[in-house]
Amino acid sequence: MCAELNNFPIFGGYMKKITLLICMAALVMLFTAPAGFSQAFKCATYPSGSTPTIKIAVAANFVGTSSLTVQNFLVSTYGVGEVVQICQGSTGALAAYIQANPGAFDMFFGADTTATQLSGVSPAFIYARGLPVLFGYTANSGKANTITDVSDLLTQSGTSFANVLSYNVTGYATGYSIPSSANDIAIADSSVAPYGQAAEDILDDMGNPPVTLVSSPGQDVSAAFSAVGNNGVNSGFVSKAQICSIFPIVTYVQFTGYTLTQMARQLTTAATPLYDYIQSQITSGAWNTFISLNCYNPI
């Protein structure tokens, strides 16, 4: 069952019209719990069917790129004999679980600088710079809810965005707004998801336009992405990396002024082979090429 709440107060007295979809049954179905974990996270093991030697906690925006990272690691000399389990969730939920359950994960990849607050066996390091975007699907996507171009996502006095499929807001979002055609807008829960907080910052700088935001308690940016295009949701605030492989069927606005510094940390010695692999890639310059191809800014 879903509950709908409107005019929900958030962020220092600001009031926005927000639709909170509280669908507990759907949340239970969305996540599967790894063995021995009381907190439920969606996990995948590489190669599948084997017992993990390394368990990593990954912020939802990075899960696709992390799977590619792990596959590259496993075919390198660093990854011989290793089996990696990737568990995804919001940065806040993962960090809270790690703090309450030391040793549950061997490495952590957050969507912000939360890694600096966790205990580890090596220093926290920047692994990516993430780009918040507001996106919607175009008519050729086959989705039920679509938009035409950037004019359905963004307005600015004296500027026409008609027939523009992507646009970069290079500074702060002051002077821009969001039209009603963007409604409803999916957003991650800003209390646990940095991309949700970035979206709130963007909206605040726009002067809090009267838009309808769709979220649920604890919703990460992966869930926000999945909500777009269905059930009356025309657009959503996500990471550019999440739409990197589907540019032909989306239109989007990128907010470079709200770039997220994403940091990781090795938590236990079990992750040393993966940590050493990534550090070798960073040192050689191959890492920046890799993450750029996956729509992150270089570190």
Image: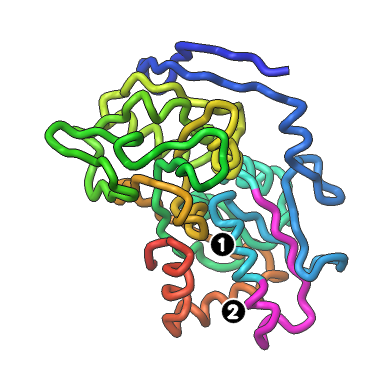
Tell me the CA gap for discs 2 and 1.
Answer: 13 Å
Of marks 2 and 1, the one in the foreground: 2
**Percent of width and height locating residue 169:** 26, 46
Q: Circle 2 — which element? A: helix
Say which amino acid is labelled 2.
Tyr
**Percent of width and height locating residue 272:** 65, 74
Query: Is residue 92 at least partly visible in the picture?
Result: no
Q: Are the residues tagged 2 and 1 within 8 Å (C-beta)?
A: no
Q: Is 114 positioned to the left or the right of 159 in the image?
A: right
Which range of residues does the magenta coloring cover?
Answer: 71-88
Q: Is 64 positioned to the left or the right of 41 in the image?
A: left
Query: Is residue 203 at least partly visible in the picture?
Result: yes
In the displayed image of the protein, which residue is found farthest to the bottom? Answer: 77
Q: Which mark is residue 265?
A: 1
Q: Is residue 43 above or below residue 172?
A: below
Q: Is residue 195 above or below residue 179?
A: below
Question: If you read the primary sequence from the N terminus, does the residue marked by circle 2 or circle 1 appear first?
Answer: 1
Q: Circle 1 — which element? A: strand
**Foreground: 195 or 30?**
30
Name the residue: 67% across, 73% down: 71
Quadrant in which the C terminus appears: bottom left
Label 2 crowd bin: few (<14), some (14–19), many (20+), radius 10 Å: many
Label 1 crowd bin: few (<14), some (14–19), many (20+), radius 10 Å: many
Name the residue: 59% across, 27% down: 231
Q: Residue 229 magenta-drawn?
A: no
Residue linked to disc 2? 277
Q: Is residue 7 above or below residue 98?
A: above
Say which amino acid is labelled 1.
Arg
